[in-house]
Amino acid sequence: MDITQLTRLVPPPIEPAEIVRWDEVEARIGKLPDDYKELISTYGPGTFWGDLTVNGPEWIEESGAQHDLVEILHRIANRGPESVNLSGAPDGRAAVGTESDQYLAWGGASGTQTGFWRVTDADPNKWPVVFTELSAIDYEPAGLVAYLVSLFGGAFDSVALPEDWLEDSRDLGAPPFERG
């Protein structure tokens, strides 16, 4: 998904983001999705609506890949459809993956929510986004920017974030985006 849809919903800061040398970053941690690189190059690492954070590549490098998340996701998915918003996934299995999958964290929110890419392919542009709150899962197969656009545009009804969190954040005067 093109970053311009996100910039229409949430204008980026006026000052340009810090330049990231993606070739050096990816030499250390491996390839990252193009939409993430475009998001960081446009906005920089930071927080949307005072709560949902997208971290920079240094944080991703420090966090590393996780291998044991699939068991937790399976437990959540087994609670039933009210705990999983699949946004186009054929079934819960697509959201939670298999034992061999790795998960790479990209951010989270102020509660217990964490956002991951499920590393499913050598091409990072095919990695779906899993956003979980340990009792619910949002799943977006089209990537991080698509997830944010759907979420901020009202097309994605998150089960992992508190109900009305975006409206409440706006009502409280939270800035649409703040670099962090």
Image: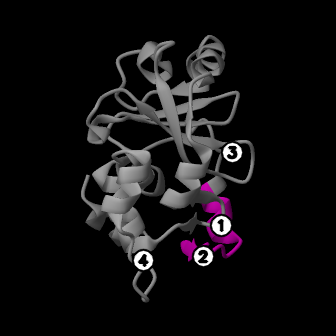
- x%, y% of residue 166? 60, 58
Contact? badges 1 and 2 (CB < 8 Å): yes
Q: Is residue 87 left or right of residue 23?
A: right
- x%, y% of residue 98? 47, 13
Q: Which badge, 4 or 1, comes first in the chain's sequence?
A: 4
Give the CA separation, mark 1 to mark 2: 6 Å
- x%, y% of residue 27? 36, 52
Q: Quadrant of residue 168?
A: bottom right
Q: Which residue is mark 2?
A: 175
Residue 12 badge: 4
At numbered mark 2, what does the secondary structure look like: helix, strand or loop?
A: loop
Q: Which badge, 1 or 2, comes first in the chain's sequence?
A: 1
Quick one: which residue is furthest to the bottom in this view?
A: 15
Q: Which badge, 2 or 3, comes first in the chain's sequence?
A: 3
What is the three-letter code of the residue carrying label 4?
Pro
Task: Work out whether residue 106 or residue 19 is closer to the camera in this orientation and state it.
Answer: 19
Q: Which residue is mark 1?
A: 50
Magenta includes 86? Answer: no
Q: Quadrant of residue 72?
A: top right
Give the CA separation, mark 3 to mark 4: 25 Å
Q: Quadrant of residue 36?
A: bottom left
Look at the picture and state if 74 lies above or below 19: above
At numbered mark 4, what does the secondary structure look like: helix, strand or loop?
A: loop
Q: Which residue is mark 3?
A: 162
